[in-house]
Amino acid sequence: MSNLSQTLDLRIKLEKWAKITIKRWQETLEKRKIGESGDLSKSFEDKVYGETADTLAVTLKFLQYGRYRDMMVHKGVKAYERNQNDANRKAATRFGAKVSYIKGPKGRWYNKPKMSQIHKMREILGIDLGHAMSEQMDQIANEISNTSAIY
């Protein structure tokens, strides 16, 4: 199993994945114009824990600001204004009432980019594991064919 761990170089791949994920999150924040001060974008940190392939883990840290609608993701809607804003939006869109409501971006910035990056990591590691396993099986097959069996 140690040869398989060395072949995969999981630690390096996870570090690269974490850097790319942070970059994509920062692009998403910039595109949605979240966090005018830049504190959220600067707060991203990544760390890979563990020494062997069996114990590797990736941690991504950032400020909580901007993950929830009452933290200015839903531009200008405070937590206590949500119910009234929702009622006004439904009245205006369904019934054509002349009321004002704050229309913000749909959904949070965090979940879609997070899940897309998780699926990408699974895909990368799955492909690499498949290649490493096929190489390992070739080596085992060559070893078996090179040894003479005594029955």
Image (cartoon, grey):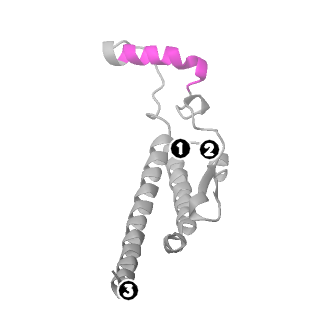
Q: Is residue 83 magenta?
A: yes
Q: Which residue position holds label 3?
A: 147
Residue at figure coordinates x 61%, y 43% from the top left: 35
Q: Locate residue 49, reporting x and y percent.
A: 65, 58
Are the residues at dot 2 and dot 1 in contact (C-beta closer than 8 Å)? yes
Q: Which mark is residue 5?
A: none
Main SS category, magenta section: helix
- Identify which residue, 122 or 101, lies in the foreground: 122
Q: Could you classify mark 1 by the number of other residues whose Cα lies within 10 Å: few (under 14), some (14-19), or many (20 or more)? A: few
Q: Which residue position holds label 2?
A: 36
Residue at figure coordinates x 40%, y 69% from the top left: 133
Task: From this view, report whether residue 143 is shown above or below residue 72.
Answer: below
Mark 3 belongs to which amino acid? Answer: Thr
Instruction: Check the image and name the residue furthest to the front.
Output: 151
Q: Which residue position holds label 1?
A: 33
Tell whether 87 sits left or right of 64. Answer: left
Residue at figure coordinates x 56%, y 55% from the top left: 22
Could you say which quadrant of the image residue 150 lies in? bottom left
Q: CA distance from mark 2 to mark 1?
A: 7 Å
Q: CA distance from mark 2 to mark 3?
A: 68 Å
Residue at figure coordinates x 42%, y 19% from the top left: 89
Q: Which residues are magenta?
A: 77-92
Sequence order check, earlier mark of 2 and 3: 2
Foreground mark, 2 or 3, reads 3
